[in-house]
Image (cartoon, rainbow, N blue to C red):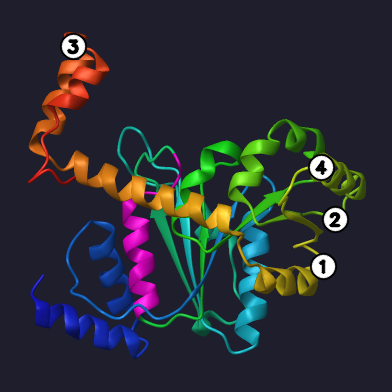
């Protein structure tokens, strides 16, 4: 895209043109160039959790509450992509109905087969939203648990949403949970057994240094939302977690660059044919001037 066309889209988007914003995000998602713009400070929340935990309903309530306070919220909902067509199911769009759509922008994004639920296009889309000055950026991811480390590369705070029947599972997944989450929202607190589940999660994390907070909330009834919103704003990731997130982001960028090398596909095919060992295939990937 020509630079003047990109600037026109950017100027229109910053004035509130949703079609221009959609076009900019599409270009960013597909890896196109939109020029260089100042990235303004933004509040970026990653939301993950198992299917059925109520992530979409909770996001709906949080976004609506923030918009009622005059804040602008952009939501990127990452949907599973078909392994055949590459298309996304876009189920989240059907489940969310916001109280003030003028302050909220929602975009479904295909995971594009990314194992961590976050494609490299999502990071570029977040950068566009930052440049346009959205107050809060929310990213809902596919899947849950230990496979969701990639969300940590684009969010400055991560919330894990759990249901009332997950207490024992949390203890089994404890190490993975601690590495990605700043806070655990125990949703559906209006259902029987929810208090016991929240206590079980707290007990499972009680002996772990730097464990995330556990907050009970009901997205359906609205109870506990104010407490959750306050705690989300108070999150300050510890240095170890920031270092881990930086490593994930750097690994993601380096992986993208390696895949763009012409020698990468040849190495991959040679390894798939089992004619060479994986280490030998890695040695086949050529870099530019010794740089990835």
Residue 209 location (% of width, % of height): 74, 47
Decide: marks 2, 4 in contact (CB < 8 A)? no
Name the one closer to the observer, 115 or 180.
180
Measuring 91% from the left and 50% from the top, which residue is drawn there? 195
Task: Find the distance from the CA under tag 2 to the CA under tag 4.
Answer: 24 Å
**What element does badge 1 sit on?**
loop
Please rate how many residues cluster around mark 4, counting C-alpha atoms within 10 Å: few if below 14, some from 14 to 19, many from 20: few
**Position of the N terminus by quadrant:** bottom left
Task: Find the distance from the CA under tag 1 to the CA under tag 3.
Answer: 56 Å
Snapshot quadrant of residue 292: top left
Please rate how many residues cluster around mark 2, counting C-alpha atoms within 10 Å: few if below 14, some from 14 to 19, many from 20: many
Snapshot quadrant of residue 285: top left
Foreground disc of the pair 4, 1: 4
Q: Which mark is residue 85?
A: none
Which residue corresponds to mark 2?
Answer: 189
Q: Is residue 48 above or below residue 171?
A: below
Q: Which mark is residue 224?
A: 1
Which residue corresponds to mark 4?
Answer: 207
Q: Which mark is residue 276?
A: 3
């Amino acid at each position: 895209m020509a630079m003047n066309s990109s600037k026109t889209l950017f100027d229109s988007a910053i004035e509130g043109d949703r079609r221009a914003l959609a076009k900019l995000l599409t270009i960013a998602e597909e890896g196109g160039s939109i020029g260089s713009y100042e990235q303004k400070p933004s509040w970026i929340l990653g939301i993950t959790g198992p299917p059925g935990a109520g992530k979409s309903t909770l996001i709906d309530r949080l976004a609506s509450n923030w918009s009622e306070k005059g804040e602008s919220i952009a939501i990127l909902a990452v949907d599973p992509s078909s392994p055949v067509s590459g298309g996304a199911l876009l189920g989240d769009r059907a489940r969310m109905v916001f109280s003030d759509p003028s302050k909220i922008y929602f975009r479904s994004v295909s995971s594009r087969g990314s194992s961590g639920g976050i494609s490299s296009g999502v990071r570029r889309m977040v950068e566009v939203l930052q440049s346009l000055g959205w107050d809060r950026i929310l990213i809902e991811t596919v899947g849950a648990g230990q496979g969701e480390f990639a969300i940590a590369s684009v969010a400055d705070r991560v919330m894990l949403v759990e249901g009332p029947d997950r207490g024992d599972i949390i203890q089994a997944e404890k190490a993975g949970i601690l590495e990605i989450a700043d806070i655990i929202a125990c949703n559906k607190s209006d259902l029987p057994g929810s208090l016991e589940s929240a206590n079980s999660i707290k007990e499972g994390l009680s002996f772990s240094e730097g464990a995330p907070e556990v907050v009970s909330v009901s997205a359906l009834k609205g109870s506990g939302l104010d407490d959750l919103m306050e705690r989300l704003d108070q999150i300050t990731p510890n240095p170890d977690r920031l270092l881990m997130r930086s490593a994930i982001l750097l690994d993601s960028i380096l992986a993208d660059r390696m895949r763009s090398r012409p020698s990468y596909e040849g190495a991959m095919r040679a390894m798939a044919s089992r004619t060479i060992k994986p280490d030998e295939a890695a040695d086949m990937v050529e870099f530019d001037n010794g740089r990835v």
